[in-house]
Amino acid sequence: MAGQDDAAPQVPDPAGRRSRGLVVATATVLALSALAGLAGWLASTESGLRALLGAMQRASGGALEVVAPSGRLIGPFGAQAVRYSSADLRVELEGVELDWSPAALLSQRLDVDHLAARRLLVARRAATQDQALAAPKDLRLPLAIDLRRVALDAFELRDLEAPAEPDSPPVFSFSGLSAALSSDGRQHRLSALALTLPQGRAELAAELDGMSPFMLTAQGRFAGMQGERSYALRVTADGTLIAPRIELDAEGEGLQGRAEVRAAPFDAMPLRALKLALGEIDPSALVAGAPRAALRLEAD
């Protein structure tokens, strides 16, 4: 009979299914273990750090160079030098040190205990024409930040086309920078910023709201020398980043003054209003042979 010629139905083999499931599970565990081991090696060993940095340098096509790295990716680690070059920019960092907590990234926090460098050189190609700064739309960060100590011994900004002569002056420079920075992603706080400019020593503390209109408060001071005469400046700022109000108080040998500035740093005309009051100006302290006097000047 035809029904007797039909093949018997296949009966699933439970043992075979269990065997295949065991093979898949075992392969998955081995793969995850291998990935975890690779990640651990990259993050927690110096050889892993060197391998990771080597891969990054190759991926950059030679634009990035890290010289003599040491330590571990999970910290602390450092490098004798870090260099980056492109057609319009050259950045050189020397004596880099970083101690951080990468596990904090899982909580959307960048937690850095110590970030330092001996020297930072930035050389960029000069702009062909002056361009007005564009006002920001949003200054919030994707994660919270806690930089407890930032230090930089020396900074130089140079033109990329300028001759690389040892005695050629930079466009801008400072030394002895130290600072601390924290942010919850929206409220940014700069505390204990201090640096030395060619003209003197500056200190600044500031807070900035990352949402428009970017409410701002800042306090700072500057102490310097002009020739053989010392002077000091005190500055406070409030308002917004778009339209700040700045007060300056100056005091020095033969000169005292106060200024109030209302600015618009992102407008074509950045100065909106200026009030100036200079008092107790002694010409003899400023110009040799001038008569002694106590002059006052006010302008609005």
Image (spheres, helix red, strand yellow):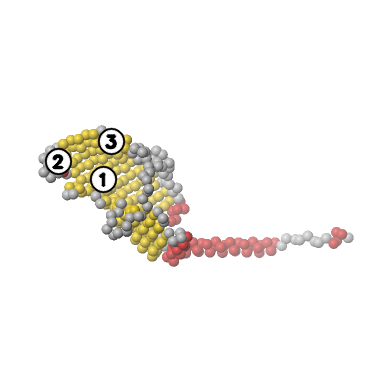
Residue located 18% across and 37% down the image: 279
Q: Nearer the viewer, residue 189 or 154?
A: 154
Amino acid type of the residue that numbered disc 1 sits on in the rendered structure: Arg
Residue located 40% across and 41% down the image: 135
Distance CA(mark 2)–CA(mark 1): 25 Å
Assign a secondary structure to mark 2. Answer: helix
User: Which one is closest to the eye, mark 2 or mark 1?
Assistant: 2
Q: Quadrant of the N terminus?
A: bottom right
Q: Residues within 10 Å of mark 1 (few under 14, many from 20)?
A: some
Residue 13, quarter of the rendered image: bottom right
Residue located 33% across and 55% down the image: 162
- Is tag 2's residue or tag 1's residue first in the polypeptide sequence? 1
Q: Residues within 10 Å of mark 3 (few under 14, many from 20)?
A: some
Amino acid type of the residue that numbered disc 3 sits on in the rendered structure: Leu
Amino acid type of the residue that numbered disc 2 sits on in the rendered structure: Pro
Residue located 41% across and 56% down the image: 86
- Horizontal placement of 248 versus 101: left or right? left
Q: Residues within 10 Å of mark 2 (few under 14, many from 20)?
A: some
Percent of width and height locating residue 128: 37, 48
**Above or below, comparing residue 6 to residue 239 in the picture:** below
Percent of width and height locating residue 140: 42, 44
Query: Which residue matches tag 2?
Result: 283
Which mark is drawn over residue 221? 1
Distance CA(mark 3)–CA(mark 2): 24 Å
Which mark is drawn over residue 274? 3
Residue 90 in sight: yes
Marks 3,2: beta carbons within 8 A: no
